[in-house]
Image (tube, rainbow, N blue to C red):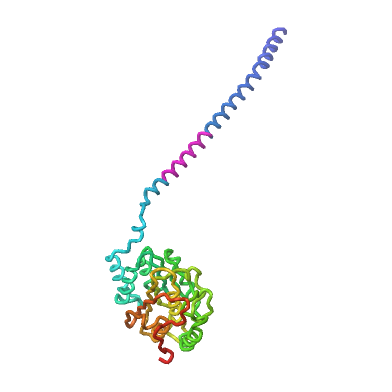
Amino acid sequence: MKNTNNINTNNNTKLILLHPYILKQGNSNRLWLLAFLSFFTVAFLLTLIYTRDSSSTSSSSAAAAAVVPTTPAQQQQPLPATVINTLLHYASRSNDTYKMSYAELKPIADVLRKCSPPCNLLVFGLTHETLLWKALNHNGRTVFIDENRYYAAYYEQQHPEIDAYDVQYTTKTSEIKDLIKTARDQVKNECRPVQNLLFSDCKLGLNDLPNHVYEVDWDVIMVDGPRGDWADAPGRIQPIFTAGVLARSKKGGNGKTHIFVHDFRKGLERKCGDEFLCKENLVEASDLLGHYVVERMDESSFQFCRNKTSTTSS
């Protein structure tokens, strides 16, 4: 019995001695595991940060290498003549019913080519030639105005490089005589030839364009809209009048503005052109295109044309 007790005692003693050791060994393993995980986590984070910085540096270096520095002179280089002729060739050969012919496109392209970049071009009407005007006015500023707000938004969506705005015309072609008479009666007030149309109440002037349109010194203005084929159509009296005022109110540049009026053979376009752009400023004309060069005027001027002639009775 004693031996058995001794054995049991010895066994109990061994258990008492081994139990704390086992616990200590388990805690040590946990500490090593925790240390290993911490080291691995820190190493992973450092690697991630280093990789990210290296990628950013590589991307920046690649982007910097891809961008070729250009001088102001290079940025203002006009399109080569061969490119211009190619654009005119394909634009005039389109099957679009309302396209301009080569004979109509060429005078406008010549003026844009000679216009020192950056050239400011304002176009009334989104037409078949819209992308052509944007391309020909390379490195210049080109703004389009159209009466159809949905088409203007659609065109900008399809061609993000196009800067287009919509405008609400308030005239009718059937009112042409009354509108010209109103402008003559108010030529020293609301409808004077030199003014900021943004603050004008003249019925013929467009005063709801974006503000910056009135601040730009336009070198070339193209009137190719809106439509005027029926009595209730808005016609082009408002853009023609507006073009005349913008040209005469010009603050900078060379003091001259080239104004092109398309569909010139129609009575309304030519009549309004003679009234507000003036015959003495007509430098070139064909059945479909009128080309005026209108000079800046003094603010005290209250007459559109030097040689005033009656168009109301014609």
Q: Which of 140 and 184 is in front in this view?
A: 184
Which residue is painted at 66% across and 19% down in the image?
Answer: 20
Q: Is residue 282 above or below residue 7?
A: below
Q: Does the magenta stretch include residue 290?
A: no
Q: Is residue 46 magenta?
A: yes
In which image quadrant can residue 146 be found?
bottom left
> In the rendering, at what x and y percent does residue 162 appear?
42, 66
> In the rendering, at what x and y percent does residue 126 appear?
42, 73
> In the rendering, at what x and y percent does residue 196 appear?
50, 74
> What predominant SS class does the magenta segment belong to?
helix
Q: Which of 274 and 32 is in front in this view?
A: 274
Image quarter of the N terminus: top right
Q: Which of 215 and 35 is in front in this view?
A: 215
From which residue to which does the magenta span run?
42-59
Q: In this view, does 21 lie above or below 160?
A: above
Is residue 235 visible to us here? no
Image quarter of the C terminus: bottom left
> In the rendering, at what x and y percent does residue 79 appear?
31, 64
